[in-house]
Image (tube, rainbow, N blue to C red):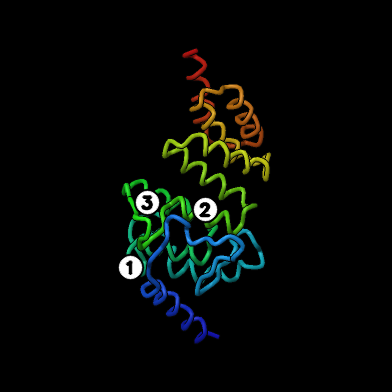
Amino acid sequence: MQIKIIILFITLVLSNKVIGANRDNTTCGIEQGVPLQNAYGPWDFTNPAHSSKLPIVLGAHFTSNVEKLKSGQTGKLIADIDYTLRAIPNYHRALYAMAKHQRIEKMAFRNIDKYYTADCYFKRALYFQPNDAISHMIYAIHLQQTQRLEEAKEHYRVALTLLPENPEINYNAGLLYVKLGDLVKARQHAEVAYQQGYPLQGLAKQIENFSNVE
């Protein structure tokens, strides 16, 4: 058993270096009706039946330093996050890390490139598991932070259709509606979030500040 785990670990590391990379950022590697494919997986983070398959990927590629965007584990930082998201397309923390990394570094990609754009990783995650409300929310946050507010609103709408009482989704949707100047909806989402004990007070303060300006 231990030998099998070692072999699998080596396979994961080597595949990260060898599988390369002509990633199509126009299609995001998605062919409608055809499942995503990867040398290992892909596994669904939201499916309990897949949970035993995840640690080998996360231990090899998505370490604490990778998640904190400090350094790569097997090579380049982006390569480790990329492998994680090819093996587990809707791994929420890796989606968040990839989007943040690309924003911080102001990365730009060609149509055919070594890695996907952040948008592509989100589109792949949602193609893989369209009913993953948290992936919709994280994508909405990324869209909001890149000033695509109407697109963000649509992903919050889908996320809230799937999990209408989720406090974190409501909190972040409320932040968007403050930015859009819709204080009525911002208050509605804030009420849902805070009734469930959501701890962050940023939304409440933004609503208060916006109200004082009116």
- Residue type at mark 2 is Lys
Q: Residue at x 36, y 70 (%)?
A: 74
Mark 2 Cα-neighbour bin, 10 Å: few <14, some 14–19, many ≥20? many
Foreground disc of the pair 2, 1: 2
Q: Position of residue 1 (x, y in %)?
A: 55, 85
Give the label on residue 75, or none.
1
| Left or right for 67, reference 108 | right
**Residue under circle 3?**
101
N-terminal label among 3 and 1: 1
Is residue 183 positioned above or below 127 on the image?
A: above
Q: Residue at x 56, y 44 (%)?
A: 137
Q: Name the residue under label 2.
A: 123
Q: Is 103 rendered above or below residue 176?
A: below
Amino acid beneath label 1? Gly
Label at residue 65: none
Of residues 101 and 1, the one nearer the viewer is: 101
